[in-house]
Amino acid sequence: MRKFVLAAAMVVAASGVASAQSGPNLIETRQVGFALLAGDFAGIRAVAAAKGDVKTLEGPAKAMGRYAAIIPSLFPQGTAAGNNTKALPEVWSKSDDFKKASAALGEASALLVKASAAGDAAGVDAAIKAVGDACGACHRAFRAR
């Protein structure tokens, strides 16, 4: 475990995600987080499509909800440009709407957690749709294509 933590710290330091002088690169951090979120969601959809054990989806669904809760904090003023960001100016000019969009993702993820914990495949399917709708709504309003 100790070797893994050290290796992970070396990868983060080498990637430029964090440095002692400037702190974390929030644009890169949020891009990595969204990539992980998309990966979790793709895995969840694959298990549901294959009629797999939906109880295994509780962990990734919780992770999605946890990330949704911190999304707004990853978009402070001054992070509108750089690292090939696709964030639109509306993230900052309509910040209340952006926070609501993030909260909608969190709420949909909570539905997914509840349905997967209960082993409710139909509930998981409905929650997957809700998560997809929340993601799409945010992308349409706040992300460049």
Image (tube, rainbow, N blue to C red):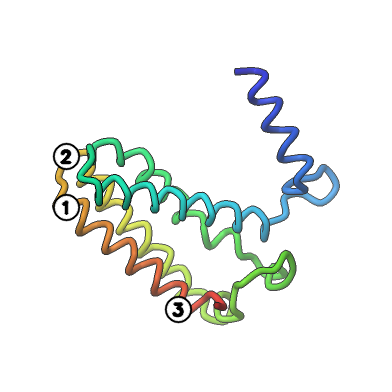
Which residue is rendered at x = 60% and y = 18% of the image?
A: 1
Placement of 143 over or under 4, stated as above or below: below
Residue 12 - label? none
Among numbered discs 1 and 2, the one appearing first in the sequence: 2
Q: Residue extending furthest top?
A: 2
Contact between labelled residues 2 and 1, with CB atoms less than 8 Å apart: yes
Residue pointed to by mark 2: 118
In percent of width and height, residue 18 lies at: 75, 46
Q: Residue extending furthest front?
A: 50
Contact between labelled residues 1 and 3, with CB atoms less than 8 Å apart: no
Residue pointed to by mark 3: 140
Which residue is rendered at x = 54% and y = 75% of the image?
A: 143
Residue pointed to by mark 1: 123
Residue 118 lies in what quarter of the image? Answer: top left
Q: Quadrant of the C terminus?
A: bottom right
Among numbered discs 2 and 3, the one appearing first in the sequence: 2
Question: What's the amino acid at mark 1?
Answer: Gly
In percent of width and height, residue 135 lies at: 40, 66
* In-front residue for pair 75/45: 45
Distance between mark 2 and mark 3 Cα atoms: 32 Å
Q: Is residue 45 left or right of residue 72?
A: left
In percent of width and height, residue 79 lies at: 69, 67
